[in-house]
Image (cartoon, rainbow, N blue to C red):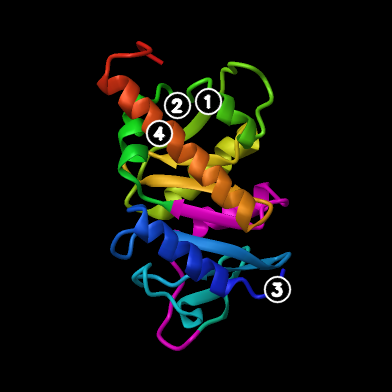
Amino acid sequence: MTDPRAKLAAAARDFYQRGWMLGTAGNLSARRTADSFWITASGRPKDALSEEDFVAVDLAGRVQEATAGRRPSAETSIHQVIYRHFPEAQVIFHVHSVEANLCGHFAKAGQLRLPPLEMLKGLGIPEAEPAVDLPVFANHVEVAQIAADMDAAFLQRLPRVPGALIHEHGMTAWGRDFDAARHHLELFEYCFRYLSLARLHGLGGES
């Protein structure tokens, strides 16, 4: 992949405008080589990123390249887990939307049943009215524990959809390129908005 930092910065501005990456919340990454990736630096406002606001790390989390004073996102370990388990993933977006955090409360036993919408075909689910669950992980102060929980769960079973939700934290989606990752994230966020409105209007009962 060619240097993706400009496209990551543009995606961050887009997500900021949507209200998904307010303040310095959220993080984005893209593969740099097969064994390393660029990720947003910690504490940087997502509406004003430059190429200097990204740090290159390897799959063990070791810094490979960085502008002085920049350190990788505190959630780098989550990206490491996803890149290790999904070799086809080239781009990862982690955002904090209101609807995603509301929907974490609807999960049961670490799974959120997605609405059986036609749009799930865009997440790789070809069936009509499918029963598909999105994995939901507990939030921890130590992000390494979240990453460890994800790693253990993915070793047991990979999710059917390219995403994972962290309760009261945010949504992570990935794809084979920028367009796929963005489309996946948009579809998940549509599902979250649908579920939130359905609950508000008393539709669908318990998932």
Above/below status of 67 relative to 174:
below
Q: Which mark sits nearer the N-terminus, 1 or 3?
A: 3
First in sequence: mark 4 or mark 1?
A: 1
Quadrant of the drawing holding the N terminus: bottom right
Q: Amino acid at mark 4?
A: Phe
Against 86, is 37 above or below? below
Label 1, on which residue? 133
Asked if the residue at tag 2 contacts the one at tag 1, i.e. Cβ–Cβ closer than 8 Å, the answer is yes
Amino acid type shown at disc 3 = Thr
Q: How many C-alpha atoms fall within 10 Å of the one at disc 1: few (<14), some, or many (≥20)?
A: some
Mark 3 or mark 2, whichever is nearer to me: 3
What distance separates the C-alpha of mark 1 from that of mark 2?
Answer: 5 Å
Q: Is residue 53 left or right of residue 123?
A: left
Q: Secondary structure at mark 4?
A: helix
Determine crowd level at label 4: few under 14, some 14-19, many 20+ residues with C-alpha closer than 10 A. Answer: many
Under circle 1, the secondary element is: strand
Marker disc for residue 2: 3
Which tag, 3 or 4, sits closer to the chain's start?
3
Return the x and y of residue 133 as percentages of the image width and height: 53, 25
What's the magenta region?
A: 67-94
Q: Which residue is mark 4?
A: 192
In the displayed structure, 68 sits above or below 4; it is below
Q: Sequence order check: which comes first, mark 4 or mark 2?
A: 2
Amino acid type for the residue under numbered disc 2: Leu
Q: In this orientation, does residue 158 appear?
A: no
